[in-house]
Image (cartoon, grey):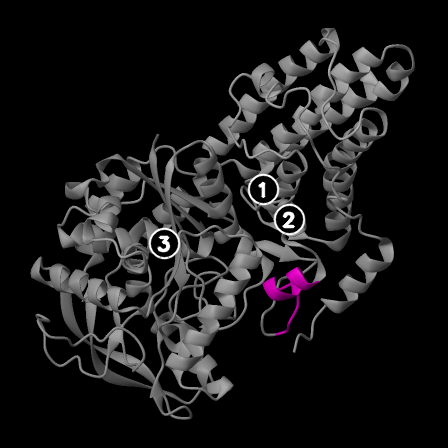
Amino acid sequence: MARILITSAIPYINGIKHLGNLVGSQLPADLYARYCRARGHEVMFICATDEHGTPAELAAARAGKPVAEYCAEMHEVQAELARGFRLSFDHFGRSSSARNHALTQHFARRLAENGFIEVVTERQFFSIADDRFLPDRYIEGTCPNCGYDKARGDQCENCTKQLDPTDLVNPRSAISGSTELELRETRHLYLRQRALKDEIEAWIDSKTDWPILTTSIAKKWLHDGEGLQDRGITRDLSWGVPAQFPGAPWEGMEGKVFYVWFDAPVEYIAGTAEWADARGLDESAWRRWWRLDEGAGDVRYVQFMGKDNVPFHTLSFPATIMGSREPWKLVDYIKSFNYLNYDGGQFSTSQGRGVFMDQALQVLPADYWRWWLLSHAPESADSEFTWENFQVSVNKDLADVLGNFVSRITKFCRSKFGEALPEGGEIGAAERALIEDLERRVRAYEAHMEAIEIRKAATELRAIWAAGNEYLQSAAPWSVFKTDPERAAAIVRLGLNLVRLYAVLSEPFIPDASAAMMQAMRSEDRTWPGAIAEALDALPAGHGFATPEVLFAKIADDEREEWQRRFAGGRG
């Protein structure tokens, strides 16, 4: 049994996320967590809401609520949606927690003591119209690198280049759109990332198994232009982790908070401490996951995120950990994703274009979305959601292949033998061929899941379902029954055992359907299959079962057309 720590990028608090956000971090992390648990590993799966920074302040202002109240409410909204999509977090925390405040300040103090933080007087944009300093994310302009006209002051989303607000061409306030900006002096804390560059690069170079997407983005930030730059880690805001605190090795930072991208990754650690607190456990319960000197040496740590988050997790957060000179666990593997686009364009939160998590669950149950999103995960390139493709995938994969198999075998058995696995008959050449095929396919499925090759795993799982359908069609127990009922009984007994096997294998992708299949088979044996021949003999003759309701309803053309019109834009 291994110990596996899993974190997915923590979503911003300012609103409900769309399906592109979901498939870029939380959903594939949940797939992997479920698989690891099914294989008997000890798993710690942590996520949280990212509650600090200007986005939270502005969203609260628009809602007419104090920012703390707004964040508390939105945390519950996002937690409920996570439950709706069956995201199996061990803990879903909050970056505004007391734990995260204390740990963020601890890391800042340690970094300063080790010479990796300096106080810098800089000139920062002040918006006359907004009467406030503008954090870099709230300055927009044209990227000097690629010409994208909606680049932010910290990073261009189009080319992922790290930026400073003063790099932008024609800068403007993202709050009001005003170009009436002044550069004014202010003092901030900077993380001296350049002093850690060689150490960070050597660490990245040691990760020879990382996806090309992850490594290429990290290398780009290390070497493009002038290379890795020192990073301002405080902002002129009131909502966040205070930068001036008792024991701080600096003065004059009153009225400033730590940059959201400094404190947010620390919440992975803090969230694990919150998990322990919620269960009344002592400090050792969470520290064994994070401190190499307290038991974390045998932990494998895997992170999941969209490609826009990669620089902060390959450079800034590791710099924080390394610079502390304390034995904290660094990530072992970063699974990053490209973007999911929507029906010929992009998802747009501001325009209400695309399907958002709350809307998706109003339209169809979670498994429909989980299957499509994971089987089309944007791993090697951007992928696109279209309603036509969604309809085809649901109807063919879920309804025609898996659902049809479960329906045919259970209904046939009920009509000819009753609702118990029939006795009699022996397996023959067809069954041995199926077992041999499934042995090979299940081992391939495992290999893809271990490697976190999500689309390949989904393809193999569908092939495993299809193999059962093809066997049933070829064996034709409905015809055999007329002349050899014992032979038909052996076919049916194997087929009903296949339902249980499919439930076990499919649980990481479609947990609700898996539970329905297990309930129908009246089994609680979720043992991951070793030898397939043994797995297909788990339910003995005489074992009762129920005929389940339709697992997956097909999507009709008129439904698809109505949803396509509904989600073309204009939410709210």
Name the residue: 41% across, 81% down. 69
Whether residues under marks 2 and 1 lie with C-beta atoms below 8 angstroms apart, the answer is yes
491 vs 166, nearest the viewer: 491
Name the residue: 73% across, 44% down. 551
Residue at image mark 1: 509
Image quadrant where residue 521 sits: top right
On residue 311, the disc is 3
> Does the magenta-highlighted stretch encompass residue 360?
yes
Q: CA distance from mark 3 to mark 2?
A: 32 Å
Q: Earlier in the sequence, mark 1 or mark 3?
A: 3
Q: Is residue 130 above or below residue 212?
A: below
Quadrant occupied by the C terminus: bottom right
Q: Secondary structure at mark 1?
A: loop
Q: Residues within 10 Å of mark 3 (few under 14, many from 20)?
A: many
Q: Earlier in the sequence, mark 3 or mark 2?
A: 3
How far across and how far down the image is residue 370, in percent?
Answer: 61, 48
Q: Which residues are magenta?
A: 351-362
Report the label total: 3
> Does the magenta-highlighted stretch encompass residue 325?
no
Image-based side of 152 in relation to 542, left or right: left
Q: Is residue 379 above or below residue 425?
A: below
Depth-wise, is mark 1 or mark 3 nearer the camera?
Answer: 1
225 vs 467, nearest the viewer: 467
Residue at image mark 2: 367
